[in-house]
Amino acid sequence: PFSELKFLDGNTIDQLGYGVWKVADADAEVVVGKAIDAGYRHIDTARIYGNEAGVGRAVAASNVPREELFITTKVWNSDQGFEKTMAAADASLQRLGLEYVDLYLIHWLQPKRGTYVDTWKALIQLQKDGKAKSIGVCNFTKEALEELYTETGVRPVINQVETHPYFPQNELRSYEAEHGILHESWSPLGHGGELLSDPVLVDIAKKHDASVAQVVIAWHLAVGNVVIPKSTTDSRIVENFESLNVKLDEEDLAAIATLDRGAEGRISADPATADFE
Ligand code: A2P
């Protein structure tokens, strides 16, 4: 039961992927190997995670043909700007041991840096060069998404942003839906904190004989988000993948919609203001 979504550029992405934020390079080969064995074909890394080489080793060691895998990486803040991004992409490809990535993303908007439009122009070039099959962004506001389009005529295919039931990003998601931009959830499990013991979710989990994490992942899938839960625990890598079998009903979705805490629900930095190296 595998769900694919279509990008504006015609390419497709598996809705459920495996994220490797905070996974050490030395561990990445093993856990990504386990994720591939569990059934994941979509792996999400980034230059700043420091584990592109480990991800690349797992890809090389797997028996899955390259074209069946979907690999995402991201340009880091200090590499923003046209020339630096072009070089950063080559360096990422080299560490990954790949000729192309399936998706290359701008990691943060970094509004004060003022280089995101030039960075986006580099991504457009990288797609033309065949080094990135598809291009998108992370942590962009709807204003900045619109600006990329007015400046270049090319919309990102996806925006990867903090999203979970306490912070569902409804306003941003409706803008994206209007323009065919997919929404991708990072920290989909709310970093594995309070969310995973929320009484509303615990009840829904009991009803479906599922874990709370599976209910949360099933919610992301049901509302149309691409979702990349991270786990380095063998049993959870499998458990999270099996969320594909959990089908929430209208009543469940309505109950989860009540958990929205607005801006209070945000765990991490606000992309509209976040500026860091
Ligand atoms: P671990 O890697 O030790 O399994 P997020 O993706 O929202 O940042 O959440 C990741 C956190 O959630 C990690 O600490 C991870 O722990 C934990 N986690 C991942 N999957 C599950 C699960 N199925 N049940 C409970 N915690 C999980």
Image: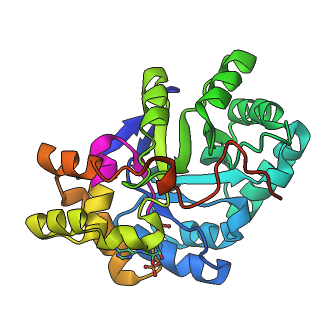
The coloring applied to the image is: rainbow
Q: Quadrant of residue 156?
A: top right
Horizontal and vertical percent position of residue 194: 39, 72
244, 206: nearer the viewer: 206
Is residue 39 in the magenta section? Answer: no
Horizontal and vertical percent position of residue 142: 59, 30
Q: Report the side of 258 relative to 114 (left or right).
A: left
59, 239: nearer the viewer: 239
Q: Quadrant of residue 41?
A: bottom left
Quadrant of picture, ligand 1:
bottom left
Q: Residue at x 41, y 51 (%)?
A: 261
Q: Quadrant of the C terminus?
A: bottom right
Residue furthest out toward the left: 207
Q: Which residues are magenta?
A: 219-229
Tell me if residue 103 can be seen.
yes
Horizontal and vertical percent position of residue 118: 83, 32
Q: Residue at x 33, y 68 (%)?
A: 240
**Looking at the picture, does residue 23 appear above or below residue 6?**
below
Horizontal and vertical percent position of residue 176: 48, 29
Count up the numbered dots.
0
Residue furthest out toward the right: 83
Q: Residue at x 66, y 20 (%)?
A: 149
